[in-house]
Amino acid sequence: MSIPRSSAERPDFQAAFLSAFLPGLGQGVRGHSRQAAFTISLFIILVGGLWLIWRQLGGAAAIFIFMLAVLPCWVLQSYMAGIPGAPLGLRPSLQRVWGRGLDIRYLGGLFLLAAGMDFYIIAANPEYAITVFCIKPLGLAGLLVKLQSPTFHTLIGYGFLRLRRWSLVVYLVYAAYGLSYSVANLACFGYGRIRTVFIASLIGFTVYILWRRHSFRT
């Protein structure tokens, strides 16, 4: 027979929702003024930096930084706002997130989002061809090459959300494939900003995921 948790042990979903709507709001409503002030100050800095990146490097770079830096901070502070009891500091909150594999689940959500964007791009631009290993396959071969990206992203995203160990293997296959054809394209066509950023981010993702490999369950 399960024992109901007391109200002090239950997550404060209202505070989490308020902070998801406006960073720091949930902490402020709960009376955690120091945490709320820190969160608001941090997001003023992050939004200002994002605006500068948008002005200097363009919208694509700003969206990339938003997904990898700003959005994780947004999700984390919303999660912290809903933690029951006294407010936790940043380090205990991160330990709680890592202990439950929530960072891997977040990456899974990003992969599913990427899969949706892939399918949209393929449907909206049927003539678009992807260059792999210095060639642009056309026809049926080109379609299969385009479909591998959303397929990989969907499998990895679902597996990461469920913390399945097989998804780690799928990711490593995806990373090896993506890195090999990107390096080949770099050798054939020279420097490209998007290509270089993809290689650097893929290496960074892979190092982090290997470091966090113990989060995956059999």
Image (tube, helix red, strand yellow):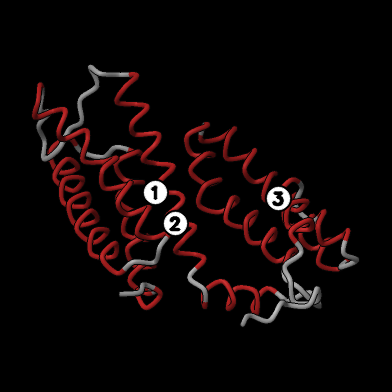
Residue type at numbered disc 3:
Ala
Nearest to the observer: residue 63 or residue 140: 140
Q: Are marks 2 and 1 in contact (CB under 8 Å)?
A: yes
| Residue 67, horizontal then vertical, whole percent | 52, 47
Q: In the rendered image, which residue does mark 1 sit on?
A: 111
In the picture provided, is 151 more to the left or to the right than 59? left
The mark that comes first in sequence, 1 or 3, is 3
Q: Establish if 84 lies above or below 18.
A: below
Q: CA distance from mark 1 to mark 3?
A: 21 Å
Badge 1 element: helix
| Residue 108, horizontal then vertical, whole percent | 42, 55
| Residue 145, horizontal then vertical, whole percent | 16, 35
User: What residue appears at the point 36 percent right and 72 percent down from the top-left corner?
Assistant: 216
Q: Which mark is residue 81?
A: none
Residue type at numbered disc 2:
Leu
Residue type at numbered disc 1:
Phe
User: What residue appears at the point 36 percent right and 46 percent down from the top-left corner?
Assistant: 197
Quarter of the image where one finds residue 139: top left
Q: Note whether residue 41 is visible.
A: no
Nearest to the observer: residue 137 or residue 160: 160
Q: Establish if 175 lies above or below 113.
A: below
Q: Which mark is residue 107?
A: 2
Q: In the rendered image, which residue does mark 3 sit on?
A: 20
